[in-house]
Image (spheres, rainbow, N blue to C red):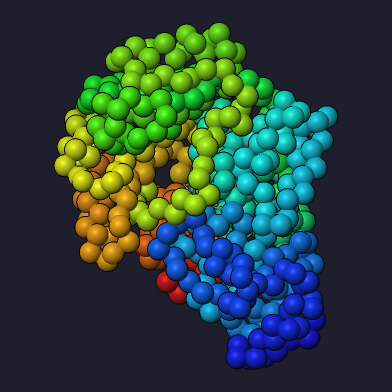
Amino acid sequence: MSLTTSPTLLSIDELRADFPDRVITPDDAAYDQARTVLFGGFDKHPAVIIRVVDADEVARVLTLARETGLELAVRSGGHSNAGHSTTEGGIVLDLGLMKRIEIDPDSRTAWAETGLTGLELSQAAAEHGLAIGFGDTGSVGIGGITLGGGVGYLVRKHGLTIDSLLAAEIVTADGELLHVNVESHPDLFWAIRGGGGNFGVATRFRYQLHELGTILGGMLMLPATAESIAEFMALSADAPEDLSSIANVMNAPAMPGIPEEAVGKVVLMATMCWAGDVEAGEKVLAPFRALATPILDAVRPIPYPEIYPPEDPDYHPTAAAITMFMDHVDEAVAQTMLRYLEASDATLRAVQLRALGGAYARVPADATAYAHRSSPIMVNIAAFHDGTDADRALRQLWVNDLAGELNQGDDGAYVNFLAEEGPERIRAAYPGRTWDRLVEIKARYDPANLFRLNQNIPPEPDAD
Ligand SMILES: Cc1cc2nc3c(=O)[nH]c(=O)nc-3n(C[C@H](O)[C@H](O)[C@H](O)COP(=O)(O)OP(=O)(O)OC[C@H]3O[C@@H](n4cnc5c(N)ncnc54)[C@H](O)[C@@H]3O)c2cc1C
């Protein structure tokens, strides 16, 4: 590929010849759809979107970005909360066509390309009675979620997604393809397990899969009272590790199965996932079901991939949000949540509670770049806004105020739930020595900060 050296001379004709039918520019009919990412509010206009099919093509796009100086956005599933997988006037490297999967049922491992979504890989693994945890939403790309950590429906049983990561193939800023695992480039392997897209483009991951067929899973919706919320969290913390849950205290949306009289009321809407013996699971779930008369109880034996809720591809929400960790949710804490949720008139507002522990907590904090292993509860607070500056500011204020009231002294943050929040919050994702190690490794693999459109770890110690 012949390259230009100035942003103004990006040669689209040459690119079209080099990546046949896979270069999209503002002149193309497919442009508007191709530049759209999941979250609304990121209305950016890339100069070019290039859909790559292999590591060699990734390296060529990196050369293009280096030589033109154009901003580079790396996109796997396009679900970045911060809008990092699109760019104004830059290059989008879109991995979405790279969906090859190789599963070895004997070793229970999979090589998976990073254009896959969590649901796609889960469905392929399920054909062999195998599974791996990603997040709570099937359309999230395995690229972004894995590189940041991955907290999902199997977190207490099998830990984060990165706790099942055995190896990766990474194209670094200079275009070299590295095979990375505990023995080969161990520093990089440590960094990509939580450090995000700062170190290169991941083209393939090798995962350890886990035997899992039928789970006991689905939605359990209960009336939200201070007692039901506090007791739900106490039961979740004490439950066997086979149980992971994601509980949203929120205003009930209008959706199939939810009685009309509950819609709009603040409820406890939880997704339960019991990944063990079904009969034993019924016993563990009984006290959750007995907390109050359920508004909806859809927890039943299902194949694991069915835990992912159906999605509307045209859904592009705009939301103010904040992520944090908490130590406990007692009745007083739950009461604070209820007070805020009931006072808000955002079309959707929620406090999401994820009880951690189990396999997640057994990994030493310094074993990967995800260091929040001793935090018992992950919390996400969100309020939808209408896209205007005024409403965005109003909802953000509400979110921040509530987060302030709920803060119990753990100032950590999960990188994959950060929005565009500035360097201090990125530091919060990487406490203590984790940050210093990441900066050192960044300086080694990406000294010019080619991969900077992300929750950025700068290559110089004091750059932030
Ligand atoms: C609806 C929704 C639900 C979510 N639920 C969960 C959840 O339950 N648990 C959880 O842990 N997270 C969850 N997340 C957060 C999610 O993990 C992050 O937003 C993640 O970054 C999305 O990955 P992606 O590949 O879809 O996004 P993209 O926007 O494509 O990528 C995000 C960033 O990751 C980097 N990146 C992506 N792919 C690569 C790659 N192959 N190589 C190098 N860098 C790459 C880039 O920096 C990119 O800007 C959720 C997000 C959404 C929108």
356 displayed left or right of 76 = left
The residue lying at 29 percent from left, 32 percent from top is 263
The residue lying at 62 percent from left, 67 percent from top is 30
- Residue 308's x, y, as percent? 54, 35
The residue lying at 77 percent from left, 72 percent from top is 19
Residue 85 seen anywhere in this rendered image of the structure: no
148 is higher (above) or lower (below) than 279 = below
- In terms of depth relative to the viewer, which is nearer, 385 or 373? 385
104 is higher (above) or lower (below) than 76 = above
442 displayed left or right of 425 = right
Question: Which quadrant is home to the N terminus?
Answer: bottom right
Furthest residue toward front: 29
Give the mark count: 0
Question: Which quadrant is home to the C terminus?
Answer: bottom left
- In terms of depth relative to the viewer, which is nearer, 458 or 346? 346
Residue 281 seen anywhere in this rendered image of the structure: yes
- Residue 399's x, y, as percent? 26, 50
- In terms of depth relative to the viewer, which is nearer, 51 or 369? 51
- Residue 292's x, y, as percent? 29, 15
The image quarter in which residue 352 lies: top left
- Residue 86's x, y, as percent? 53, 67
The residue lying at 41 percent from left, 25 percent from top is 257
